[in-house]
Image (cartoon, helix red, strand yellow):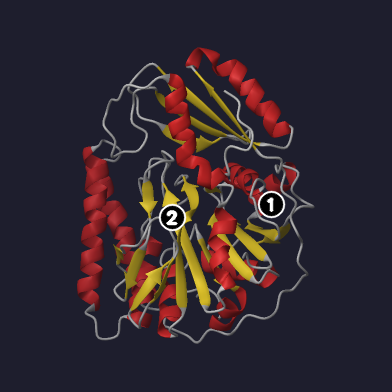
Amino acid sequence: MIASSVSVVVVSRGRPEALTLCLTGLGQLIHPNFEIVVVADPEGLAATLAAGWGDRVKMVSCDVPNISIARNLGIEQAAGEVVAFIDDDAVPEPTWLAALTAPFADPEVAAAGGFVRGRNGISFQWRAREAFADGTAEELKVDTDQVSLRRGVRGRAIKTEGTNMAFRRQVLADLGGFDPAYHFYLDETDVNMRLAAKDCLTAIVPMAQVHHGFAASRRRRGDRVPLDLFEIGASLVAFVLRHGAGLDHDTIRQSERDRQRKRLLGHMVAGRIGPEDVGRILATFDAGWRDGQTRKPIGLTPLGQPAVSFQKFTPTTHKGHVIYGCRPWQRRSAHRKTLAAVAGGYHASLFVFSPTIRRHSIRFTPQGYWLQRGGLFGASKRDQRVMRFWNFSSRLQAEVEDVTNFRQIPQIYFN
């Protein structure tokens, strides 16, 4: 059973192209009853309008660099029983929302989180994790084939990732939503800790998957080099002030500073930044920690009822899923056929296999179809052998089977 109605909230700032791609992916969701709420800066709202989404989604203006404030604005406009969140630099698999919200059929479930794939579209950035009062998180072992229901306890929470999470709206509203003390970083973890303190039940949903690209922002470059660690320092101290009673805050600060320094040194060794940049960027962490000391915990006021009525979204693709497989020299023809399928109202996936051992990658294209590329004899999953002999048809069938559950494939199958 799927929750009766769902509001999908997308917060965007400074990334109009990424937001447009995210919306294209949301437009292909397989779910009977959802709405989309876009909370964005003027640049993002202009891109939403330019892409023809103005009358299809709820648009909320927010030009404040504070993700918690933006998310709360989204919640205030969300009229669904469940509120789901995805980042603007992420794209969902078509079945993401249905899988993520299905556990809310159990009235005890207050929150849900799915798995997040990284830039290559295959490896996982995050799966299931636990969060702790010092701001750290560790992997949580769960069954990767089915939903797991877990409860946290005070000081240890079941973590949901900000780019792939959902909450029962009333529960989240009663909590006061997201704490504006967290401008960026640990904002969702703070909510997880408050839910754990209330003995709330969280569903971990492996089949609810999104692809997260780590797009460039004002805080990091496209190659993931951080430009500014101010909010990481500030949010961390705000977090331990609220949740870390009895913990040594100086030890927490130094541990995180050492972790960030190690990350920066890795970028320096790789030639992405110079030696002088390491100290300069670390100084922003120190400044943030000092600023965070002023963000004392405050009581959060419960959020009110939705400001506007539910605006049901009609997906752009709904007729089934079309598969094309080709060699690189057939790519142009296959691309045209795939575009025609999308224009005709179908989901579409294109698999391009070269006669090599290149590793595979998966991405969602701006034209609205899934593209998987790699060598016919190369590995797709990163734990596979570097080389394995295949014939074309067998390889295509194997790769299609791997994504069938996420895309409801194949209803229509072309090769």
**Could you tell me which secondary element the residue under label 2 belongs to?**
strand
Closer to us: 71 or 367 = 367
In this orientation, which residue lies closer to the viewer: 374 or 248? Answer: 374
Kindly identify the residue that appears in the image at 39 percent across and 22 percent down.
376
Q: Amino acid at mark 1?
A: Leu
Up the image or down, 18 lies above or below 104; here it is above
Image coords of residue 315 (percent x, y): 71, 48
Is 241 on the left-hand or right-hand side of 30?
left
Q: Quadrant of residue 317?
A: top right
28 over 282 or under it: above or below:
above
Badge number at residue 45: 1
Q: Are marks 2 and 1 in contact (CB under 8 Å)?
A: no
Tell me how far mark 2 sits from mark 1, CA to CA. 28 Å
Locate residue 294 relative to residue 104 in the image: left or right.
left
Mark 2: amino acid: Phe
Labels 2, 1: front one:
2
Secondary structure found at label 1: helix
Residue drawn at x 24%, y 41% is 268
Check disc 2 and report the residue beneath it: 115
Q: Where does the image place residue 67, in percent across and percent down from the top left?
A: 53, 64
Q: Earlier in the sequence, mark 2 or mark 1?
A: 1
99 shown above or below 188? above
Q: Quadrant of residue 276?
A: top left
Residue 330 position within the rendered picture, expressed as x and y whole percent measured from the top left: 54, 14
Residue depicted at x 26% and y 64%? 256
